[in-house]
Amino acid sequence: MPEAPSALDDLLALLDLEPIERDIFRGRSRSALVPRVFGGQVAAQAMVAAGRTVPPERPPSSRLRSSRGVPQPHSLHAYFLVPGDPGAPIVYEVDRIRDGRSFTTRRVVAIQHGRPIFHLSASFQTDEEGLDHQAEMPAAPDPETLPTAEEMLPRHLPEDIARRLVEARAAVDLRYADTPPWGSVGTLREPRSQVWFRTHGKLADDPLLHVVLATYVSDMTLLDSVLLAHGRGGWAIGDVVGASLDHAMWFHRPFRADEWLLYDQESPSAAAGRGLGQARIWTRDGRLAVSVIQEGVVRVPR
């Protein structure tokens, strides 16, 4: 397994797109645990593409650095259309929908083999003051008291699957507050899951970079709560077939993805071969940073 700092550098390089023409970018893919591109990667790369076109425009950089005063993301809404091919590059075409005084809107289409595989709408806002309130942060154990992925995964999964999962997530320190679904197969539990996460290493100060990393991580565990309600272990052990369908995020307050964030997730519904997950991401000091909703295919193999 690569060293954690190297893994983070590799992830940042993966997310740092190559400019092809004005508003057209190319991203790499890498092999995944399943024969398709990881949805969090596509969503994160699309946010990079959108952010690169928001004035004053960000120059290409492995750290995605930006100038001060750039409008920052406040929401994204995305649809996963068809599975991506991990063996082929992805082209991202950005449509500059609107450049306003306070809000900037972009639409991004991801294309492989000549057809769209994903599209995203993103809205950016310049900083301003306004009304301010939030819900209370839920209780959760301290992240330092929880086992790391390297410690936990081999307890519940076959060695080869555990090793591949650890390698796939090596850039992120992700710690479950309770047993994950593939560690409690056959046990019906409350459809709720908590995960602490942060990157394995420090990041540059660009707020877009931290939004991009949170977007990447947000697709890793959100549908776990659906599985818990039915005693299913998920795609890691093959007792369900699943894929993300759509994904939405709202960025309420500044945060850093290289500091501990609590991903508090629950599932209010599963029906018709689909499961819904909703979540909030909290900073360690109790600020509500992000709200997330995702629906995905959740089918039982016949």
Image (cartoon, grey):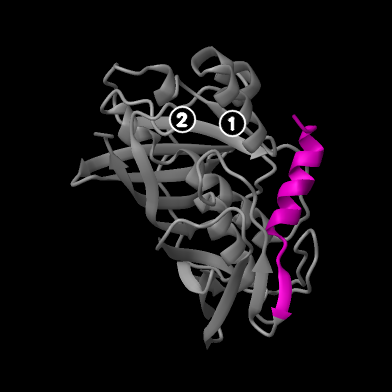
Image position of 289 (left or right of 190): right
Task: Please say whether residue 14 is one of the residues in the magenta stretch.
Answer: yes
Residue on which disc 1 sits: 165
The correct choice, above or below, for 206 with respect to 2 in the image is: below
Q: Is residue 71 visible?
A: yes
The percent coordinates of residue 292 (x first, y second) are: 42, 51
Mark 2 lies on a secondary structure that is loop
- For the point 45% across and 19% down, which residue is it? 179
Q: Which residues are magenta?
A: 1-20
Give the amino acid at mark 1.
Leu
Residue 267 numbered tag = none
Mark 1 and mark 2 residues within 8 Å of each other at the beta carbon: yes
- For the point 52% across and 74% down, which residue is it? 114
Q: Quadrant of residue 50?
A: bottom right
The correct choice, above or below, for 12 with respect to 260 in the image is: below
The percent coordinates of residue 56 (x first, y second) are: 72, 81
User: For this rendering, which residue is in front, 151 or 175?
Assistant: 151
Residue on which disc 2 sits: 236
Give the amino acid at mark 2.
Ala
The correct choice, above or below, for 71 with respect to 84 in the image is: below
> Who comes first in sequence, dot 1 or dot 2?
1
The quadrant of the picture occupied by the C terminus is top left
Mark 1, residues whose alpha carbon is within 10 Å: few (<14), some, or many (≥20)?
some
- For the point 38% across and 25% down, which residue is it? 233
